[in-house]
């Protein structure tokens, strides 16, 4: 299929979608493919108002098609109005038949509006098309930036000044703004198992609610720096199509300790308002440190607030999947541990995992290298360290004018990295002694 074919399919799909959406009032914004939905989204109406009209500028904005008029000229069932550049279908059935014949069936499988029309009207040649399946194939409304922004707007309207206090505690990302996916990470069988459990729990929320099983959906990621805790949490947001709220507990704690408890409450309140979502609390140990008797009363209060907030939030009831991450599990007390239904270990990768991580990092790089040897020589390196080693090797090759990765450059990078780490720890030790 060449670029011109794609452009034609784009225009016709848009026109068919508009036609179906306008005609079938049972359809809502969730029934539009993401690109179209985003373009016609009306923040105030919290949806896509009818009728959708299609003009040249819309096609250009949605697909980047430069020559809309020329594309239309080749399709006899499209009418192009010179004035205003509005497009419409003269005979819809003709357009649909052309679309199906020209390879559009695959698109209908992911376009609930057209699929709905085909299913209801029993359109010839679309026997396998299912509206329900098409709807599953488009990202849910709650995962879209426009939807998240609308909810944030609600928070601003309903909470007044308090809203800014809530919003500055965390960063909020839409799933498709997340640059990493689960496929790029090398995970252990236990990690895979937990992920599939959580996916199943999320899919069956109503069932869990029915049978009264509420205490599901709180995970603690434990492991040394650079082992993929943050990356996995982010990738989960993409995988589950849930907005991602990311917070460092050190940012929630305030020099005025009284504020800390308030901030914790604010954070969980925000998560509930943006649900369904993932609330990712990094540096989890920062507040939940062992509650020793001589600690300041306000810290104790903050810890208690945090534990209580965790108790009260639930994936099943509120749609908030909670993930805590820590490098210092020894700092957490039993009361904190008990609140998580899954503790997921992120250990330093073994040789086989290191090889897989290295191969994934270098999957798009050319050259002659053998990651088995690199993996063997990098005992004790984290995933993040391996990334740095490969980067170092690539850069040193580039400096010598080569775009190919070589084994020698990788081996030198390992040496260089070990030397630098050695120096770093050496310096730290000296500081410690001083
Ligand atoms: N198992 C892994 N597979 C693939 N890449 C990994 C893995 N572990 C770490 N990485 C890579 O290392 C980098 C750092 O990982 P990440 O920030 O997720 O670590 P972390 O456990 O959150 O560290 P920290 O405790 O310092 O916050 C990322 O770029 C990630 O892609
Ligand atoms: Mg991290």
Image (cartoon, rainbow, N blue to C red):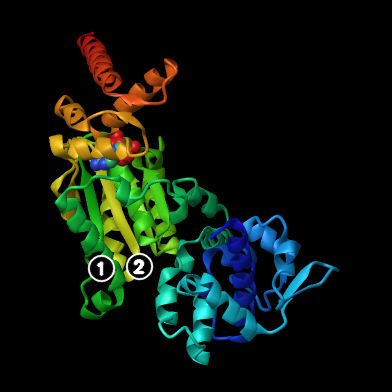
Q: Residues within 10 Å of mark 2 (few under 14, many from 20)?
A: some
Residue that carries the numbered disc 1 in the rendered image: 201
Front disc: 1 or 2: 1
Image quadrant containing the C terminus: top left
Q: Which image quadrant shows ligand 1?
A: top left
The spot of residue 47 in percent (x, y) is 59, 72
Q: Residues within 10 Å of mark 1 (few under 14, many from 20)?
A: some
Under circle 1, the secondary element is: helix
Residue that carries the numbered disc 2 in the rendered image: 318
Viewer-closest of 264 and 284: 284
The residue sitting at 36% across, 38% down in the picture is 250
The spot of residue 160 in percent (x, y) is 57, 57
Viewer-closest of 254 and 131: 131
Residue 316: image tag: none
The spot of residue 196 in percent (x, y) is 23, 61
In this picture, is 254 found above or below 75?
A: above
Does the rendering let one see residue 286?
no
Is the CB–ligand 1 distance for label 1 below 8 Å?
no
In this picture, is 83 found above or below 293?
A: below
* Residue extending farthest right: 83
The residue sitting at 44% across, 75% down in the picture is 134
Q: CA distance from mark 1 to mark 2?
A: 13 Å
Left or right of residue 17: residue 249: left
């Amino acid at each position: 299929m060449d670029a011109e074919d794609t452009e034609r399919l784009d225009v016709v799909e848009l026109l068919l979608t508009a036609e179906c959406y306008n005609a079938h009032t049972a359809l809502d914004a969730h029934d539009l493919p993401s690109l179209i939905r985003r373009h016609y989204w009306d923040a105030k109406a919290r949806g896509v108002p009818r009728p959708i009209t299609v003009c040249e500028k819309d096609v250009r904005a949605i697909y980047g098609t430069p020559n809309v008029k020329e594309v239309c000229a080749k399709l006899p069932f499209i009418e192009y109005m010179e004035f205003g550049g509005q497009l419409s279908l003269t005979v819809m059935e003709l357009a649909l038949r052309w679309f199906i014949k020209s390879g559009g069936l695959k698109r209908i499988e992911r376009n609930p509006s057209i699929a709905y029309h085909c299913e209801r009207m029993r359109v010839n040649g679309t026997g396998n098309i299912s509206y329900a399946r098409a709807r599953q194939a488009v990202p849910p409304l709650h995962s879209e930036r426009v939807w998240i922004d609308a909810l944030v707007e609600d928070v601003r309207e309903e909470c007044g000044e308090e809203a800014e206090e809530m919003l500055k505690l965390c960063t909020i990302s839409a799933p498709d703004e997340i640059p990493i996916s689960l496929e790029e990470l090398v995970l252990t069988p236990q990690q895979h198992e937990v992920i599939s459990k959580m996916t199943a729990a999320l899919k069956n929320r109503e069932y869990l609610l029915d049978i009264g099983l509420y205490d599901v959906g709180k995970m603690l990621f434990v492991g040394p720096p650079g082992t993929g805790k943050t990356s996995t949490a982010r990738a989960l947001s993409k995988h589950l199509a849930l907005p991602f709220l990311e917070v460092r507990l050190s940012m929630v704690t305030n020099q005025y300790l009284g504020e800390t408890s308030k901030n914790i409450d604010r954070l969980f309140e925000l998560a509930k308002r943006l649900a369904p979502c993932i609330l990712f609390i990094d540096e989890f140990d920062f507040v939940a440190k062992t509650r020793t008797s001589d600690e300041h009363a306000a810290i104790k209060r903050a810890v208690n607030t945090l534990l209580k907030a965790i108790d009260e939030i639930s994936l099943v009831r509120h749609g908030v999947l909670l993930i805590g991450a820590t490098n210092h599990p020894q700092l957490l007390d039993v009361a904190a541990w008990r609140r998580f239904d899954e503790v997921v270990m992120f250990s330093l990768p073994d040789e086989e995992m290191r090889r897989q991580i290295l191969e994934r990092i270098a999957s798009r790089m050319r050259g002659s290298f053998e990651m088995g040897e690199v993996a063997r020589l990098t005992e004790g390196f984290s995933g993040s360290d391996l990334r740095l080693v490969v980067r170092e090797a690539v850069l040193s090759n580039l400096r010598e004018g080569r775009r190919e990765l070589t084994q020698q450059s990788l081996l030198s990078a390992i040496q260089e990295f070990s030397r630098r780490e050695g120096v770093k720890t050496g310096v730290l030790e000296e500081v410690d002694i001083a």
